Amino acid sequence: MADQHLFWITSRAAGILALLLSTAAVTAGLLIGGRLVRRRGPDLRAAHEALALAALAAIAVHAAALLFDSFLSATLLDVTVPFVSSYNRLFTTLGILCGWAAALLGLSYYWRGRIGVARWRRLHRFTALVWLLSIVHAIGEGTDAGQPWFLLGIGALVVPALGLLALRMTEPKGVTT
Amino acid sequence: MTVRRRILEIRRSVAVIAVAVFIALFATIYVQMATGRDPALGKVTSSQQQPASQSQPGSVTTRQS
């Protein structure tokens, strides 16, 4: 039975991986800008960038695999354009918007010279909001969202990241980079 | 070790870990599905519970949407 759903399994695994990687990327980003880690060397920045790019790749696999799932029969428009798919429309749309926003905000790093560094930093803060909405997408639509292994695995990464985000938001202005 | 080499090493580590986690997740979901404990493929109805007059297949599995 599982052999008939290999692309669907691929999409589910890639979706969970994307959430894990984006959570790790957000955590690294918060550590770079926060006061908890004194040594903000190239290691943390390199990890942040690599994790973010890996998360974007996982998001692409998550969506692309659905195109080959014979049960869902999703089209390219279904997985890339908001409100087109009739499958769980609200959470699917949220996922699509989060995917595009993550790609635009993440890849804008390579155009920060043109955007302007200060403007890019303000823009980059919205990544945290996109990450939070992607958690809502995963819990609202994820097939495995009710599974104990999913909740434990995601919780182990998400809860510390939420703590760091709360800490960052309560820091006095001018301290963060 | 140069900074550039260190950065390449970090990128390689992230890629290896990502692939390993993907394989682990894929295997977990595959086994879950193969053993009939998948949350989306849980609806299995048996013809033994239906009247004998109906000629349904032995079991029907549907994916929840």
Image (cartoon, helix red, strand yellow):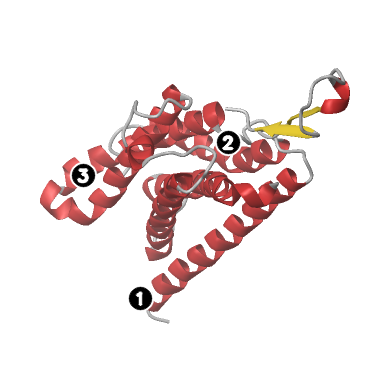
Residue A13, relative to residue A174: is it above or below? below
Q: Amino acid at mark 2?
A: Val
The image's mark for residue A120 is 3
Question: What secondary structure is found at the residue carrying circle 3?
Answer: helix
Mark 2–mark 1 CB contact (< 8 Å)? no
Q: Which residue is mark 1?
A: B4
**Subunit under mark 1:** B
Question: What secondary structure is found at the residue carrying circle 2?
Answer: helix
Q: Nearest the camera: A141 or A65?
A: A65
In percent of width and height, residue A133 lies at: 43, 30
Q: Nearest the camera: A148 or B55?
A: B55
Q: Is residue A172 left or right of residue B45?
A: left
In percent of width and height, residue A150 lies at: 65, 39
Q: Which residue is mark 2?
A: A159
Q: Amino acid at mark 1?
A: Arg
**Subunit under mark 3:** A
Q: Is residue A144 left or right of residue B15?
A: right
Q: Nearest the camera: B23 or A114?
A: B23
Q: Earlier in the sequence, mark 2 or mark 3?
A: 3
Label 1 CA crowd tier, 10 Å (few <14, some 14–19, many 20+): few
